[in-house]
């Protein structure tokens, strides 16, 4: 494990912490506890007295402090990649992560200054998941396992199973859409539009409709669709690719995570959006997305530039390698 990989994993973990802190801010309704930005009640952010961090200020200002730390870590990661990473596309990903975290900070400020407008708040939540996905990718791409899987002597065959490729590629996309629907539900106050679980007003389909009920019910339908797709992907891997432990492990993790996530979603409703449960629901959703992304990237390993370069070198080497001498042939 290289130090660059360790650092990328640190950025990834810090980003998950940031998403969790953001979930606590929305769950406790603390988004406007600090009404100014980028300062905090007129103080420079890092000079704000710790003794004043009480109630909602603790959650909102703490969220800002974590966000600042993530921003600084991302700057370090982008610079490190630009100076030390030979793969050009990786250097560009580092720049993309830096742009994303900067834009995320600006959206956070706009959210406060314009009193939590729904489109900006949902965009802020959605971009957070995009940035988290970038950090997941950077941590994976700098790992020794990823580099080994693109080496000439790898024992992992290229995935030519079109069904698996379709499942593993579509899964993170579906999870991301589900997270966006959840963010819309959260920021439009639709979290308790359907007050019971697993039924909806005692029925499978709500007997009455409004925008809030429709968004909430769509989120539940999305959860079922996501769970079914995860189960289908895991089953396909077990039946057709049981030897690929690098794919089986994230698939099983996804099964456990999505079952936990559905349970937390139901608990969120039954507890009337208890902050700790609601925040755990947000954090677990991010982990489902990250794990689905890892699985999708590993299945599509052969599509990446460094894998194609390795394949080209292997093909070229096989063409120029001398043929073994036949028995009895003159040397």
Image (cartoon, rainbow, N blue to C red):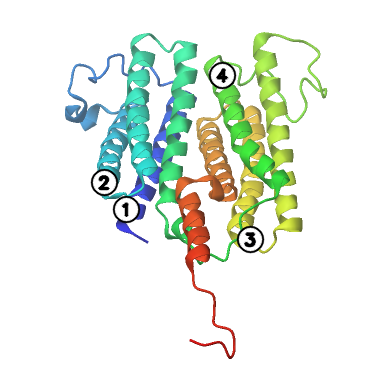
Residue wearing tag 3: 244
Q: Are marks 2 and 1 in contact (CB under 8 Å)?
A: yes
The label nearer to you, 4 versus 2, is: 2
Residue 118 on image: x %, y %: 49, 12
Residue wearing tag 1: 4
Could you tell which of marks 3 and 2 lies nearer the N-terminus?
2
Could you tell which of marks 4 and 2 lies nearer the N-terminus?
2
- Is label 2 in a helix, a strand or a loop? helix
- Is 95 or 128 nearer to us in this picture? 95
* Quarter of image, res 210: top right
Left or right: 291 in relation to 76: right
Residue 82 on image: x %, y %: 27, 43
Q: Residue at x 70, y 58 (%)?
A: 241
The label nearer to you, 4 versus 1, is: 1
Above or below, 136 against 242 in this view is above
Q: Residues within 10 Å of mark 4 (few under 14, many from 20)?
A: many
Above or below, 188 against 266 in this view is above
Q: Residue at x 24, y 20 (%)?
A: 40
Residue wearing tag 2: 80
Quadrant of the image containing the N terminus: bottom left
Q: Are marks 4 and 2 in contact (CB under 8 Å)?
A: no
* Quarter of image, res 219: top right
Could you tell which of marks 3 and 1 lies nearer the N-terminus?
1
> How many angstroms separate mark 4 from mark 2 (CA)?
36 Å
Left or right: 221 in relation to 268: right
């Amino acid at each position: 494990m290289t130090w660059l990989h360790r650092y990328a994993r640190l950025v990834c973990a810090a980003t998950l912490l940031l998403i969790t802190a953001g979930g606590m801010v929305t769950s406790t309704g603390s988004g406007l506890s600090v009404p100014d930005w980028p300062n905090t009640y007129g103080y420079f952010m890092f000079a704000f007295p710790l003794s004043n961090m009480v109630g909602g200020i603790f959650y909102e200002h703490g969220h800002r402090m974590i966000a600042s730390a993530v921003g600084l870590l991302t700057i370090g990661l982008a610079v490190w990649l630009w100076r030390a990473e030979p793969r050009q596309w990786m250097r560009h990903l580092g720049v993309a992560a830096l742009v994303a975290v900067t834009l995320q900070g600006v959206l956070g400020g706009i959210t406060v200054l314009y009193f939590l407008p729904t489109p900006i708040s949902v965009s802020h939540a959605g971009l957070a998941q995009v940035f988290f996905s970038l950090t997941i990718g950077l941590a994976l791409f700098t790992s020794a396992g990823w580099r080994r899987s693109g080496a000439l002597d790898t024992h992992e065959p290229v995935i030519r199973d079109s069904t698996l490729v379709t499942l593993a590629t579509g899964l993170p996309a579906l999870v991301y859409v589900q997270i966006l629907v959840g963010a819309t539900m959260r920021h439009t106050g639709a979290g308790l539009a359907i007050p019971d679980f697993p039924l909806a007003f005692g029925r499978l389909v709500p007997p009455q409709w409004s925008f809030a009920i429709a968004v909430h019910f769509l989120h539940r339908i999305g959860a079922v669709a996501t769970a079914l797709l995860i189960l289908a992907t895991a089953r396909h891997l077990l039946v057709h690719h049981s030897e690929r432990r690098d794919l089986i492990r994230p698939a099983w993790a996804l099964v456990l995570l999505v079952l936990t996530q559905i349970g937390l979603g139901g608990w969120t409703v039954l507890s009337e959006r208890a902050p700790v449960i609601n925040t755990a629901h947000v954090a677990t959703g991010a982990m489902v997305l990250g794990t689905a992304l890892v699985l999708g990237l590993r299945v599509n390993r052969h599509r990446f530039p460094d894998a194609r370069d390795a394949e080209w070198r292997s093909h070229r080497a096989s063409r120029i390698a001398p043929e073994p001498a036949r028995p009895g042939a003159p040397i």
